[in-house]
Amino acid sequence: MAKTTDRVALDDWYAIATASELSESMETTRLLGQAIEYGLKADGTPLVREILDDGARGAALPSQVRYGCLFTTLGKPTKDIVHIAEADEDDRRFVLCGWVTMRASGLRVVENFLDMAHFPFVHTDILGSEPHTEVPGYASEIRRDVDEVWATNCTFFQPRIAATEDTGDFVHLTYRVPSPFVVMLYRICPTSPNRLDAIALFIQPMEDGLCRAQPVMYLVDPISTDNALLKFEQVIFMQDRIIVENQRPLLMPLEPRAEIPTRADSSSIAYRRWLKEKGIRFGTTAGGA
Ligand SMILES: [Fe+2]
C-alpha cells in the first residue's frame, strides 16, 4: 500500500527503532504505508528519510531520541511525544522489551492492552486466574485538557502481578492513552506501594493491518535481574500477539455498535469514541488509504 492520506495519523510521532541499535548502515522499515530508512549520520545524529517510489530518498524527516527509542513523523505533529515523568527518576529500572511484530491494526493492539477481561484466559496464572474473572468497576474518560484517554481505579486479582511477586493480590492499575498508537499502564509497585511502575507500549503502525510494538518499562524494582524483567514481559506479549492476530475484523471497527460492549469495556468505548472524534482512518475498517 502507498503512504496514507490520513492527516490524523500522519501528524503524530512514532517510535520506529531502538536507539542503541542505530548505526551508519541504514535500515529500512515501513510507517503508515510508506517505506522509510533510518540510521545515523557520520556525526552520530539520527537520520530518517522516506524511500520514494523511484528509489530516491526524500528530505530528512524530523526525529527525536527519547525513552530509548528513535521517534519520527511523516507529518506536522501538533503535540510532542508523550511525557513520561517516571523516566526522569534516577532510581528507576529502565527496560526495553524489544519489538514484537503483529499482523493486526495497531489500534487493536492498544485496545487489547486496555482490556483486563482477558487476563485470566490469555495470561493464565500470571495476570489472572479462574475463578477470579470479574473486572471490578472503574472509571474511563476522555480528558479534554490534555486530549488523552484515561481509565482509573482499575483493580484486578492477579496471581503474580510483577516479576518480584509469587503470590496473588489485587493490583491497582491506571491506563493512559496519550496518542492513538501509544498506550501506558501505571501499576502500584508491589515492592514500594507509594510509587507507580510505568509501562509504555509504543506502536509503529506499518500498514493498516500490520504493526510492531515496543514495550518500555520504568520500574521500581531493585531485586529482579534484567533478564527476569524482560522474560516476564515477553511471555505476556507473546500471549497477546496470538490474541490480536486472531481478532476479526483485524482492523478497528469504529461504527456504532460494531461490537457489543460489556461493562468491562468502558475504556475501549472511550478510546473508540476518541478515535472517531479525531477522524482517524489508518488501522480502522474505514481504511487508511
Ligand atoms: Fe494481554
Image (tube, rainbow, N blue to C red):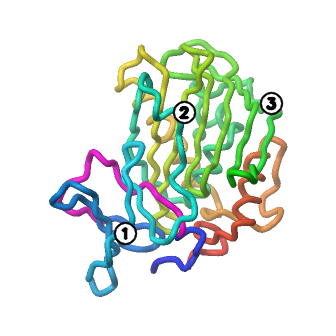
Q: Which amino acid does label 3 sit on?
A: Pro
Whether residue 105 is in magenta: the answer is no
Q: Which circle's residue, 1 or 3, is located before the other in the chain?
A: 1
Give SS at disc 3.
loop
Residue 113 x %, y % = 61, 44
Classify residue 18 as left or right of residue 215. left
- Of the two numbered discs 2 and 1 on the same chain, state the one appearing first in sequence: 1
> Is ligand 1 less than 8 Å from the beta carbon at label 2?
no
Eyeballing the image, is 131 above or below 7?
A: above
Question: Is residue 27 rendered magenta in the image?
Answer: yes
The residue segment tinted magenta is 11-28
Is residue 56 shown left or right of residue 140?
Answer: left
* Residue 214 placement (x, y as % from top left): 44, 46
Residue picked out by circle 1: 61
> Is residue 56 positioned above or below 205 on the image?
below
**Residue drawn 59% across the image and 12% down it:** 167
Query: Which circle marks residue 198 in the picture?
Result: 2
Q: Mark 3 points at which residue?
A: 136
- Secondary structure at badge 1 equals loop
- Which of the marked residues, 2 or 3, is nearer the chain's N terminus? 3
The nearer-to-camera label among 1 and 3 is: 1
Residue 23 lies left or right of residue 51; in this view the side is left
- Of circles 2 and 3, the one toward us is 2
**Residue depicted at x 73% and y 27%:** 155
Amino acid type, label 2: Ala
Residue 192 lies, in percent from the top left, at: 56, 15
From the image, which quarter does the C terminus lie in?
bottom right
Residue depth check, mark 2 versus mark 1: number of the one nearer the observer: 1
- Distance from disc 2 to disc 3, alpha carbons, whole Å, reads 22 Å
Q: What residue type is labelled 1?
A: Leu
4 vs 167: above or below: below
